[in-house]
Amino acid sequence: MNRKLSLFTTTALMFSAATGNAQHLNKKLIAELKDIYSADQYYRLATKTAAEKYGWDSPATDSLMRLQGKADVENTSRVTAIIDKYGYPGKSLVGKENASLAFMVIQHSNAEIQRKYLPLLTKAAEKGELPKQSLALLIDRVKTGLNEKQVYGTQLWQMGNTVKLYPIVDEANVNVRRKKVGFPPLEIYLQQWNIKYKVPTQKGNPNPDSLYYSYEQREESPVELIGGEKALYAKIKYPENASQEHVSGWVTVELTVDKDGKPKNLSVVKGLGHGCDEEALRVMGEARFTNKTGEDHDMRYRLPFARR
């Protein structure tokens, strides 16, 4: 089963320096953010451990991924409620060492949430409320989600055992930008994935094309949904339970399209609960594809759920 590489929390994003006037910090809010952060990391760490032991294809890993997706939805709801009440909970409100806690949840939310809160987090970073590294990560995630070139080179993509770097804008100066926000040189950063990298010059790129992920290849996929996404979305029946709880967002389903264009091995990797996950599986299970590969093809689809 193919999976996009998920970047787990690194200590580089968590700051332990003392903040000084601790008596002015919102201790109740700090405790709540720490609780949310623990929930954000729990299944991620468990999933990583299971994948290393059993592989990404294992039932244990898939089960944890589904639990992670449900936790992400709940955590996002809690963090956005905090932001709506306080604005971004940054350094002056929760201390320097806790300034990235809310960001951690936002970066693990869906693309719409990431784009919605990017301007707010940008202003927070400009005011010193949020570390520049955190903002840089979110910028790259939003860019790659829009099929645009990333800025800082933080985002990688994985298919099987192959790890590739998403394209970078003005790549010759990527380390200049990385240094400004406190990141190590890209060639050092990529060593943890055993990627040998050299920064391109204005005259040429010494790295092979195979090092980079190609958006064009994704857009020209040999496997296509029959009828298109609009028709697929029209088949979604918004669950009554989700309506009562005012649940909305996206459910991400991972599946394998067989050589005849029929889906199999469906699983929810990022869900909403309240009946939405089951409905997404039903809709995708009834979908049909044209498959020019002549073999099984792994892919993901995101289905929208909202009150109509």
Image (spheres, helix red, strand yellow):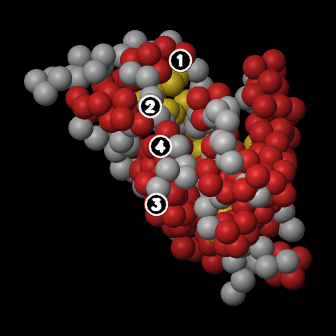
Identify the residue shown where x is 73% and y is 48%. Answer: 22
Can residue 152 be seen in the rendering of this structure? Answer: yes
Residue 59 versus residue 226: which sits nearer the camera? 59
Q: Are marks 2 and 1 in contact (CB under 8 Å)?
A: no
Q: Are marks 2 and 4 in contact (CB under 8 Å)?
A: yes
Q: Which amino acid does label 3 sit on?
A: Lys
Q: Residue furthest bottom?
A: 308
> Which mark sits nearer the N-terminus, 3 or 2?
3
**Residue at disc 4, secondary structure:** helix
Q: Quadrant of the C terminus?
A: bottom right
Q: What residue type is labelled 4?
A: Lys
Query: Which residue is labeled 4 in the image?
Result: 132
Query: Which residue is labeled 2 in the image?
Result: 182
Identify the residue shown where x is 39% and y is 23%. Answer: 186
CA gap, disc 3 and disc 1: 32 Å
CA gap, disc 4 and disc 1: 24 Å
Q: Which amino acid does label 2 sit on?
A: Gly
Residue 251 versus residue 189: which sits nearer the camera? 189
Query: Which residue is labeled 3 in the image?
Result: 123
> Which mark sits nearer the N-terminus, 3 or 1?
3
> Which mark sits nearer the N-terminus, 4 or 1?
4
CA gap, disc 4 and disc 3: 11 Å
Residue 79 percent across, percent down from the top left: 72, 61
CA gap, disc 2 and disc 1: 20 Å
Single out the mark in the foreground, 3 or 1: 3
Query: Which residue is labeled 1 in the image?
Result: 193
> Which mark sits nearer the N-terminus, 4 or 3?
3
Residue 237 percent across, percent down from the top left: 76, 77
> Which mark sits nearer the N-terminus, 2 or 4?
4
Identify the residue shown where x is 39% and y is 17%. Answer: 187
**Residue at disc 3, secondary structure:** helix
